[in-house]
Amino acid sequence: MLAEGAGVPDDAGEILDAIVRREALLSTGIGHGVALPHARCSCLASLAMAVGTTSEPVDFDSVDGAPVRLVWMLAGPERTAGHHVRMLGAVGGLLRDGRVLESLLAATTPGEFIAKLSAAESV
């Protein structure tokens, strides 16, 4: 989904490999059912992001041991490293609010998820 949205569907394997290599260093399961897998990948021209929820919790070796239901994936080229870090911080800050997290997890359609995310960002 991230590769297709970034316009590089043929490079999905390269992006996945970069994410998996980064995840092998340290889990990006930040707790409370959230994971923020991220990596840098030369196949991308700019920062790209995809988000999804799972119907069943997934073991992600999270810091709190809790399984993950919300996965927020971020990838971009090396030159966007500063923006990459700021984006991770912004997402993490938004998700620290338990009400926002619960609202996003309760969404049943992509449109509802986007609407809830937009509402949370405007507060």
Image (tube, rainbow, N blue to C red):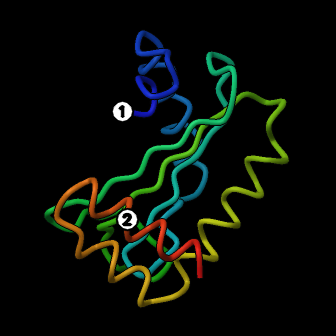
Q: CA distance from mark 1 to mark 2?
A: 19 Å
The foreground one among 121 and 73 is 121
Q: How many marks?
A: 2
Q: Residues within 10 Å of mark 2 (few under 14, many from 20)?
A: some
Q: Looking at the image, which residue is at 49% across and 17% down?
A: 7
Q: Quadrant of residue 71?
A: bottom left
Q: Looking at the image, which residue is at 63% across and 21% down?
A: 44
Disc on res. 115: 2
Query: In the picture provided, is 57 more to the left or to the right than 90?
Result: left
x and y, in percent, of residue 103 in the image? 33, 80
x and y, in percent, of residue 65 in the image? 39, 79
Name the N-terminal-most of marks 1 and 2: 1
Query: In the picture provided, is 97 more to the left or to the right than 102?
Result: right
Q: Looking at the image, which residue is at 41% across and 90% down?
A: 99
The foreground one among 47 and 113 is 113
Which structural element holds mark 2?
helix
The foreground one among 88 and 64 is 88
According to the image, label 1 marks what residue? 1
Q: Residues within 10 Å of mark 1 (few under 14, many from 20)?
A: few
